[in-house]
Amino acid sequence: MKHEHAELKEKVRNMLLVALHDNENNLEKLELIDAIQRLGVHYHFEAEMSALLSHIYQLHLKNEDLSDNNDNLHYVALKFRLLRQHGYNISCVLFDKFKDEQGGGFKESLTGDAKGLLSLYEAAHFSVHGEDILDEAIAFCTAHLEAILLQHQLDLTSSKSASNSSMTTCLIKQVKHALNRPMLKEPQRLMSRHFLAFYKDQESHDSRLLSFAKMDFHLVQLVHQKDLATLTKWWKDSDYANKLPFTRDRIVESFFWALGIYWEPQYSLARCTVAKLIAILTIIDDIFDAHGTLDELQIFYQASQRWDMACIDEFPEEYMKVAYKALLDFFQGIEDTALEEQRPNYAPYAIELMKNVIPSYLKEAKWCYQDEYTPTTEEYLSVSLVNVCQALFAVTGFSCLSDPYVPEDVIQWTASNPQIVKAADYIGRFMDDIASHKFEQMRKHVPSVVECYMKEHGATEEEAVCVMREEIRRWWKDINEACINRPKAIPMPYMRRVWNQATILDVLYKERDLFTDAQAMKDTVSFLLTESVWGT
């Protein structure tokens, strides 16, 4: 298989090179880039993809895109989305031509163009603040795509033939999937697994690309299975499940989380290290959230600020010793690996971020001990955002990358909590609280942002959640804005990792807390890690 995989890889590369030198067929170029990206094989062709997208962007800037498709909604939306996805600051004025000339909404003639509507729907999610036309586009496309789906269902139930439907079966599936999870919020491996089935059913699919993508998905899946086996052995050898029986045993879920950030096969070290970090943080969170007494937590906090293994002798309980040693051993492991591989040692940056997290756990624990105390929303967020840990995840993952090594200025910038990191923290905190606040209030637990907002503003739960969801939409715009306005010293691939962190949070907490409800996540984990792709 590896020999055939290598041969097909070169054929796909040649397809990109041919497209780069083709002065026509711009729609085909964009659709090729989109298919390669959504199938998850673009990491093999970064130079070629970058060159082709740069060429397309330069033609756009010079008004030299003379494609016959410039009035084609699908083409315009696809170009906009692909360029925005890769950090190009392309203007949304492209869509003005699709608005009613009398100053109304989008043209009524677009309502029957399901493919164009789907492309516009996906593109509009990459909006930034002030792009009202894209907010209108999401509402317009959602309404009409749902109407088309409903009509299709009515056609089927009334025994009309499929040929009478305005949409192909393949497009129907893609619309249903997109309405539930737009591309902006979909982790790459989930996207690839779903798109393999969609792409196969497209009449215009390229059999070479499809075969290559299936082989690649399978080979990468084998790497992920090996990584999970290694991680599971580490967890079992550590015996935390027995030494700390009160904590959640979520090693598979931790791996799934990390997989959403670092999915490429060459990033095993970053993937497994971030998964270990999530598992360790789960232990610490459970100690502060449900197990330790306030006096014990105070001692643990003080020890964390000293960051010295000698502190173990001062702990009154065995569980504290186990957890503290696990914490320090983890970060020491990052330092040791960096030394072995002769990489820059960025563990001190991660340690400082970790030391900033512990006080937020302690503050929340103290709130729990204050009967009927509910902080203001601002006070709550000033504490609880810190323990979403998005800067810590990013710096820890970046510390494990090589070929090339991450420059120290990228580490420093990430640790400074820039706009994209803040946005990911807000998204994670609000989604987690919305998903889990009812369950957590069934026991002694710090109020969530939902309860804080309800009490402060005299709002109902429904009203509070509605406000939270609107805020989440705003922070996704922050992520998009950060990507297209990023500092010159921060390449887009590093922005993409933090973006990935936000997408996996959306998966974990969209409907309910999947990280805590392991059974609910079982099918998704199996879909990515164990189910064969060959039957797709």
Image: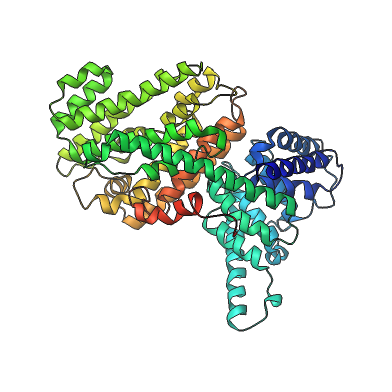
Q: Is residue 467 above or below residue 254?
A: below
Horizontal and vertical percent position of residue 187 = 53, 46
Instruction: Name the foreground residue: 142 vs 206.
Output: 206
Horizontal and vertical percent position of residue 470 = 46, 49
Please state if 225 lies on the left or on the right of 463 as rendered.
right
Instruction: Name the foreground residue: 505 vs 331.
Output: 331
Please state if 517 lies on the left or on the right of 147 as rendered.
left
Q: Is residue 360 above or below residue 476?
A: above
Task: Please say whether residue 103 is visible from this viewpoint.
Answer: yes
Residue under the point 12% across and 26% down: 316
Quadrant hosting residue 113: bottom right
Horizontal and vertical percent position of residue 416 = 45, 23
Quadrant hosting residue 402: top right
Q: Quadrant where the C terminus lies? A: bottom right
Instruction: Name the foreground residue: 84 vs 536.
Output: 536
Please state if 339 lies on the left or on the right of 359 as rendered.
right
**Residue sitting farthest toward the bottom:** 159
Horizontal and vertical percent position of residue 57 = 75, 37
Residue under the point 22% across and 40% down: 242
Q: Is residue 331 above or below residue 213?
A: above
Task: Please say whether residue 502 is visible from this viewpoint.
Answer: no
